Amino acid sequence: MQYIWQHRLYKSADMVTNDGRRVRVLDPGLLNRDAGPDFFNAKVEIDGQLWVGNVEMHVRASDWRRHHHDRDTAYDSVILHVVDKDDAPVYRTGGERIPQLVLQVSPLFLQQLNSLMNAPTSLPCSATLSQLPLLKVTEWLERMAMERLQNKAERTLELLDSFAGSWEDVCYVTLSRNLGFGVNNDAFERLARRTPLRLLRKHSDSLLQLEAFLLGQAGLLDSSRATGDPYVDRLTAEYAFLANKFSLQPLERDNWKLFRLRPQNFPYRRIAMLAHFILGGFRLMEDILEADGEKQLRALFQVTLTGFWATHYTLDGKPARPTPALGNASIDIVLINTVATLLYAHGSATANERECDRAIKLLESLRPEKNRIIAEFETAGIACDNAFTSQAMIELKRNYCEARKCIYCKFGHHLLSQAATTN
């Protein structure tokens, strides 16, 4: 009802109070999201007389007394009570009767709203998306992309507070999380938080110790059995020494999901890659800020693993053909979720618009993600040409479509407005 009133989606020709006086809304007022009347400073003509004040809304008029508004002077400024069911008169604390209006809405509006709320698909307006004006689609997707980027930046700045302003620590945890590529994100973040960067830096001159630290803390080294591989046995022994020295507590092995993963997506090599970044000292955030363009940023993640991990996907598997630590598609994902987020967050924190623009331009230059959400929008007729748009689609789907917040979405609002104004 607030939405209908705010956006004037009622049948204005039928606006009459319950005692027969004609109502004309000049200004619906400002929506109040806190305690008190629903709309402030509305301007309403009742039988030609101008009233300026607040508007209160209820599904049933009797809710006025049920909510004790008849005894609350904060509601004495209400000039119009708008309801769906007129089942009682309402009065101010002084006994004056308040004009009351039953909100009249087009049946088509209610049908459209019901259709969106109860659509059998996870994309409620998929059947009509291709009919929307291109400008409206473009504007809303740009808004969604920025909303997603800003939300990510806010979470990053919360992380920055927890690390006392250390951007390298934030970068370490953010990169670690995103090396999980969705399936193991939470496990990688837990690993990073349980194995702080300050501790790893003390051993940054030894790749063996870094890998032992991280794989051991991940709960992926089994000290109860010998593998027969000298390097794995050295890792296990090294972690046992480090765990005793620093009183380390590893994650449970069942934190990690391996089912239906391709070998190159197993966490072992991702962890070995993380060790590579810490070798010689972790300065990835500095490198990201200094990089000039997508090519240099991409080069930061074109890592070649050496030794045991050059030919292994697990600790006890057979040697395999050497492959890059991250393929081009995986690097794209890291650039989208790690680099663009960090650039935008750092730019926001330092009021550096250039860095914020770099984040946006990076997303616009990258190929779009390929997943079920993007496929749904493309099937519905909305093209996706870059990562800026694919991020917008993910934001829209997760925070609006799946939550059925159609009245807050410009696509849904367009459909509802059309239905409300159709006779």
Image (cartoon, helix red, strand yellow):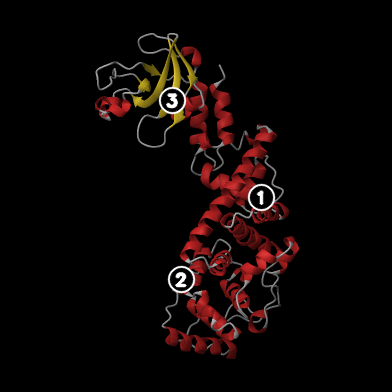
| Separation of marks 3 and 1 at Cα, in angstroms | 39 Å
Q: In this view, does 5 lie to the left or right of 325?
A: left
Q: Which of 310 and 296 is in front in this view?
A: 296
Are there few (<14), some (14-19), or many (20+) residues within 10 Å of tag 1?
many
Toward the front, the furthest residue is: 351
Label at residue 388: 1
Q: Which of marks 3 and 2 is nearer the N terminus?
A: 3
Find residue 421 and report its image quarter. top right
Q: What residue type is labelled 1?
A: Phe
Query: Is residue 215 visible to us here?
Result: no
Residue 200 location in percent, x, y? 53, 79
Residue 362 location in percent, x, y? 69, 56
Q: In which quarter of the image is the N terminus?
A: top left
Count how many numbered circles sit on residues in the image: 3
Mark toward the viewer: 3 or 2: 3
Q: Residue at x 55, y 55 (%)?
A: 152
Q: Which residue is drawn at 60% across and 54% down?
A: 351
| Separation of marks 2 and 1 at Cα, in angstroms | 35 Å
Q: Which residue is drawn at 43% across and 80% down?
A: 248
Q: Which of marks 3 and 1 is nearer the N terminus?
A: 3
The residue carrying mark 3 is 41
The residue carrying mark 2 is 254
Q: Which of marks 2 and 1 is nearer the N terminus?
A: 2
Q: What residue type is labelled 3?
A: Asn
Where disc 2 sits, the SS reads helix
Where disc 1 sits, the SS reads helix
Q: In the displayed structure, would residue 306 be above or below residue 230?
A: above
Q: What residue type is labelled 2?
A: Asp
Query: Is residue 145 visible to us here?
Result: yes
